[in-house]
Structure formats: C-alpha cells, structure tokens
Image (cartoon, rainbow, N blue to C red):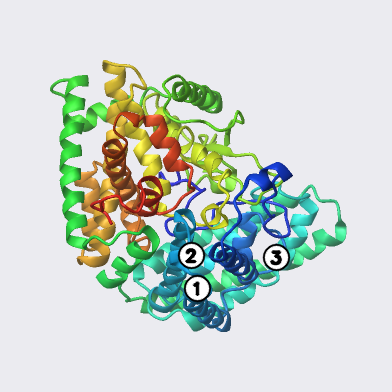
C-alpha cells in the first residue's frame, strides 16, 4: 500500500492518477433526449463552467506533469514549473484567479452541487498559494527535485496510453530539460533539515536506477535507431546531472543542512482548512487522536487475548503472519480474495459496484517494489485508451534468503490480505474510482482530498468486518486483530503529524511513538517518522475515517427508517473525492447541523 498509501491518491487537493490520450478534457456529450430533459443552466452555472474550463486549460499548460497524470496528453513532451520565474508567474496567476472567482460567479445563485465546486476551486487556489508562498518546498526539501525528475519520465512508462515509440519521444524531450531541474537546486535550496538531505541521498539511488536501468529496459522494444540514439544522448546528460546532484548533496548541502522541518501551527491549520475543510483546533484534534489510540490499544489486547489467552498481544499478532501464500501463488490468491470480497458486497448490499470490469491483480513493476507492498493504479479521469486499473502486489525477490522471503510474505498472510484488499479495491479505492468516473463535475473528477480518499479506505476496513465479512469466532478475531494493528499505525501517523509540526515533537520521539504506541518494529517506526517530518498531513487516514463515521451517524438520524448502509455508501462515493465536510453538505443539505469536524 505504498506504506499503506495507494498510488491513486495523494495527501492534499490532488489530481487523480496516471492517465491517457486526449488532447484536452473531452466535453460531456448527451443524447438529444437527455439534453432535452436536462434543465437549462442558470447564468451563474454557465459562468462557473466557463471559469472552470479556462482554469484547467491554463493549469495543464503550466503543469505538464499534472496534465499527463490526468490523461491530457497535449504536453507530454514538455516540462516546466520548476524555474523561479515560472513559480512567480504561477503564484500571481493563482492570486488573480482567486480574486476573480467571486467577481465572475455569483456563488449565492448556484445550486448546492455547483456551490461545492465553487468552494473546492477557491480552496484549491488558497492551498496552492499557501504552498508557494509559505511552505516553499523548493527551498526546504531537496527531494522535490528528485520527485520532479523521476515523475516526469515514470508517468510516461507507467501506463500504455499511447504507442511506446510516441511515449519514448515525449520522454526524450522531457529528459532534455531534466539537467536544468538539477541545476536549479543549488540556487534554490537554503537550509533544509539534515534529515531531509539524508533522505534525498537515499532516494537519489532510485532516481539514478530509473534513468540507468528502468527507462532503457522500458524502451528497448522501440526499433527506431535514431530515436534510440537520441535517448542515449539525453540519458547520459541526465545521469551526469544526477551524479552532480549527488556530489552537491553530500559535499555541499549536507554539512549546512540545519533547518527545522516543522511548518508551525498557523500553516498547519490553514492546510487542514484549505485541503480537508477542517477547522478544529490542534488541541482538540490531538485529544481525540490520543483517546482513540488508547481505545484501539485496549481493543487490540482484548482480541489478542481471545485468540491466545495469556500470550503477549504482539506475539499473537506476529504468529498470524506465518500463515501466508507461497510467493508463486500471491497473484492468484489475491485475485481469489478480491472475488470473495466483491461478492460479499453484492450479497450483503454494502455498496453498488457500478461496473462488471474487475481490477486486475498484477505484480508491482520492478522499479516500484522498494516503495510499495500493495497499491491501486487507476487511469486518469480523461483516459480514453489505457482505462484498466491494476491492483499491484509486490512479490518476493528471488535472490532473498528463506527468512527474508518469509518476512516479506507475512504482510500477505491470510488474515491481512483481505484487509489490505478491502482498502485498495472493494469497496475501497477501486470502487471509489468507478464511482468517480460517473461524476459529471470536472472539478470533482480532478480535485479531491486526502482525508476523503484515505479515510474511505480506512473506514471500509472496519466497516466490512462490522458487517460480518470473515464470519464469526476465531477467524473473525484474527481478521480483526490485523485491522486493529493497521488502524493503530494510522492513528500514530495522526498524532505524529500533528505533534511533529505544531507541538515540538522530535524525530526520535516520533520513532518511539510508533514503536511503543503502534507496536511497530524499529526499522518501520523510523520509516514512518521520517515520512511524518515531510508529510505533515498524513493524519488524513484517521481524520477521514473519523469524519465519515460521524457523517454516517448524522445520516442515520436525518434519514431515519429510510437509512440503509447501501444508500449511505452510494451517496457518499457518488460525488468524487471532495473534503468530507463538503460531502456532508451534499448529502444532508445546508440545513444539517454542524458536525464536530467542521
């Protein structure tokens, strides 16, 4: 799960996944009968749609990587957005658009769904302005340049959205610009945290391997000799630039990396407001997180005690990891697990699955195996060719020892694999993806929130067991123990993200939190703490689940005897990935009482 985080969603307001082959977002077309039945748009709605269309056209021009990810392939051979003048221009553009929105569109005259789009667009502008003006990652995080260099070419080989030769030509054009990306870093980076520079020195190995091995392997079938020669020329330039960046990181930047990683309470609260629609105080958020962690720990001990009375809970948990499929059976076992889960959804009326098309289970691509156990790769919202979705699981490396292989495969034990698959596929991220494909709003197809996307995945893990998946008795307890262990990890992220960035928690204290409160091994605790220093809002998993549970209780009260779980779930996912407070407005209407997280 990409450390339990799928590839199809990101932490903040985001553009959804890798995608496909149209020159620009296609217009929604309807039959003449449907058009006749559709009410005429009001002037405010017409104005909003024109504003949205113009913004996305400009957004994709300014951000070619975002366009490629969304399935808009006009700019596949272009790379920009990293130069100082481009950032300054983008900041001025965002401020101008934010100021122009209320002048161009009368929000009060919009119906509820269009008001949601208006608010999401305004919050998107504010979130990006905050990032460019205040967070300033290009000054603080040397990993930004590695991500730019890696992502720009990886997204061209990740999906077969166009003939390989065409994608190779685009990659060569982008590779011609990559050395300029690394050349910009020394002038921009000021005083990053030492930990971030150390992480960059680890991450750069993967970037180098992408250019040295993965790209030539991916493009090897292309027979055009001139294109292959052009590729080798740009590859050599990129590798030289990467090697120069390694020397810069090690010899120049690392000795003077003394900056703080915390973004501070004011910035953190603004990020939560703009990206997740949450305005609670940090103190109240932390109080809930600590209380929920304690409650979950007690439940974990109780369930472990039922499975093996008198045995230490973590020993019980680790013992379950020994019951795993053989490495060669991983894909087949996962496929069978998905079918079982999918059928349970249908038989028990959990949620409507709006397509017979299955997510394809496949081995994680070799170049991504160091980062991911399991992930969902879905097409961009404007994909027209490579529309399939892949549920990736990472096989054991054939060069590993028997002990290494056993430890790796323990992640896919018979009690954990169903929980992971629920989160990633049914009714988690894959079902979210299927429903989002039906959304008419361009804003809600392209923008989303981490707390809704990841909160939904985490919510479904518990909900499915609550509804009886896995049966009763010892089998149910073993599934529940794995679900609780995964929830504790997300709760630790919740507490760590808040505390590292607003309450002075140190990296070492965060490591101890994951070890002592989430029962993680030292190496995994260190990985989680490192991530928390640079991903401040990785609280979104537990935060989103909390808000969705609260929303379900509100819906039960408001809908009364008309409430069913299927009605609630269908309604929730029918709007795309908006922040949960916006989903709440769309479900319950403006007259709904404020929730605890508004």
Residue at 53 percent across and 74 percent down: it is: 104
Q: Specify the quadrant that holds the N terminus.
A: top left
- Residue that carries the numbered disc 3 in the rendered image: 75
In the drawing, what numbered circle is on residue 486? none
Q: Secondary structure at mark 1?
A: helix
**Image location (x, y in percent) of residue 506:** 23, 63
Q: Nearer the viewer, residue 382 or 493?
A: 382
- Residue that carries the numbered disc 2 in the rendered image: 121
Q: Is 375 above or below relative to 468? A: below
- Residue that carries the numbered disc 1 in the rendered image: 101
Q: Is 165 above or below relative to 180? A: above
The reply to whether callout 1 and callout 2 are in contact (CB within 8 Å) is yes
The reply to whether callout 3 and callout 2 are in contact (CB within 8 Å) is no
Mark 3 closeness class: few <14, some 14–19, many ≥20 residues within 10 Å: many
Residue at 41 percent across and 69 percent down: it is: 197
**Image location (x, y in percent) of residue 135:** 39, 73
Q: Nearer the viewer, residue 135 or 185?
A: 135
Choose the circle earlier in sequence order: 3 or 2: 3
The mark lying in front, picked from 1 and 2, is 1
The reply to whether callout 1 and callout 3 are in contact (CB within 8 Å) is no
The mark lying in front, picked from 3 and 2, is 2
Q: Secondary structure at mark 2?
A: helix
Q: Is 467 above or below relative to 264? A: above
Mark 1 closeness class: few <14, some 14–19, many ≥20 residues within 10 Å: some
Q: Specify the quadrant that holds the C terminus.
A: bottom left
């Amino acid at each position: 799960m990409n450390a339990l985080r799928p590839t199809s969603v990101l932490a903040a307001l985001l553009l959804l996944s890798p995608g496909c082959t149209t020159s620009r977002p296609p217009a929604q077309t309807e039959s003449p009968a449907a058009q006749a039945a559709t009410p005429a748009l009001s002037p405010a709605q017409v104005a909003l749609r024109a504003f949205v269309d113009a913004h996305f056209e400009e957004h994709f021009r300014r951000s070619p990587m975002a366009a490629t990810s969304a399935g808009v392939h006009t700019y596949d051979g272009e790379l920009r957005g990293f130069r100082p003048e481009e950032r300054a221009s983008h900041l001025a553009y965002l401020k101008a658009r934010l100021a122009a929105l209320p002048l161009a569109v009368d929000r009060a005259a919009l119906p509820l769904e269009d008001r949601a789009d208006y608010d999401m667009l305004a919050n998107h502008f504010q979130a990006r302005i905050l990032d460019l003006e205040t967070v300033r990652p290009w000054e603080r995080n040397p990993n930004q340049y590695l991500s730019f260099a890696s992502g720009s070419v990886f997204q061209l080989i990740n999906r077969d959205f166009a003939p390989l030769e065409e994608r190779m030509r685009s990659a060569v054009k982008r590779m011609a610009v990559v050395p300029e990306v690394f050349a910009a870093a020394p002038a921009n980076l000021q005083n990053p945290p030492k930990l971030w520079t150390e992480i960059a020195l680890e991450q750069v190995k993967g970037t180098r391997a992408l250019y040295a091995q993965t790209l030539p392997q991916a493009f090897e079938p292309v027979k055009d000799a001139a294109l292959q020669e052009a590729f080798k020329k740009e590859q050599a330039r990129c590798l030289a630039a990467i090697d120069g960046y390694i020397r810069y990181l090690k010899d120049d930047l690392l000795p003077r990396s003394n900056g703080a990683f915390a973004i501070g309470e004011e910035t953190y609260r603004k990020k939560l407001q703009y990206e997740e629609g949450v305005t609670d105080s940090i103190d109240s958020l932390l109080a809930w997180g600590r209380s929920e962690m304690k409650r979950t720990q007690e439940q974990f001990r109780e369930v472990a005690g039922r499975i093996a009375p008198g045995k230490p809970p973590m020993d019980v948990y680790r013992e379950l990891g020994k019951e795993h499929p053989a490495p060669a059976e991983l894909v087949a076992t996962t496929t069978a697990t998905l079918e079982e889960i999918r059928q349970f959804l249908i038989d028990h009326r959990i949620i409507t699955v709006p397509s017979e098309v299955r997510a394809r289970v496949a081995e994680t691509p070799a170049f991504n195996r160091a980062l991911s156990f399991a992930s969902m790769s879905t097409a961009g919202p404007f994909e027209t060719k490579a529309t399939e979705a892949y549920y990736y699981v990472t096989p054991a490396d054939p060069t590993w020892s028997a002990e290494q292989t056993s430890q790796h495969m323990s992640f896919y034990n018979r009690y954990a694999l169903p929980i992971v698959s629920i989160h990633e596929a049914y009714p988690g991220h894959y079902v979210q993806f299927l429903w989002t494909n039906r959304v008419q709003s361009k804003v809600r197809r392209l923008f989303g929130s981490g707390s809704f996307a990841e909160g939904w995945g985490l919510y479904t893990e518990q909900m499915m067991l609550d509804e009886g998946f896995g049966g009763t008795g010892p089998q149910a307890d073993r599934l529940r123990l794995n679900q609780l262990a995964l929830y504790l990890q997300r709760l630790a992220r919740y507490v760590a993200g808040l505390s590292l960035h607003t309450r002075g928690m140190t990296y070492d204290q965060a490591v101890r939190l994951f070890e002592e409160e989430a029962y993680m091994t030292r190496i995994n605790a260190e990985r989680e703490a490192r991530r928390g220093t640079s991903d401040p809002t990785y609280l979104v998993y537990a935060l989103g689940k909390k808000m969705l549970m609260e929303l379900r209780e509100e819906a039960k009260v408001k809908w009364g005897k008309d409430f069913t779980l299927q009605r609630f779930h269908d309604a929730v996912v029918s709007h795309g990935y908006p922040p949960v407070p916006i989903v709440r407005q769309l479900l319950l209407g403006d007259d709904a009482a404020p929730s605890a997280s508004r």
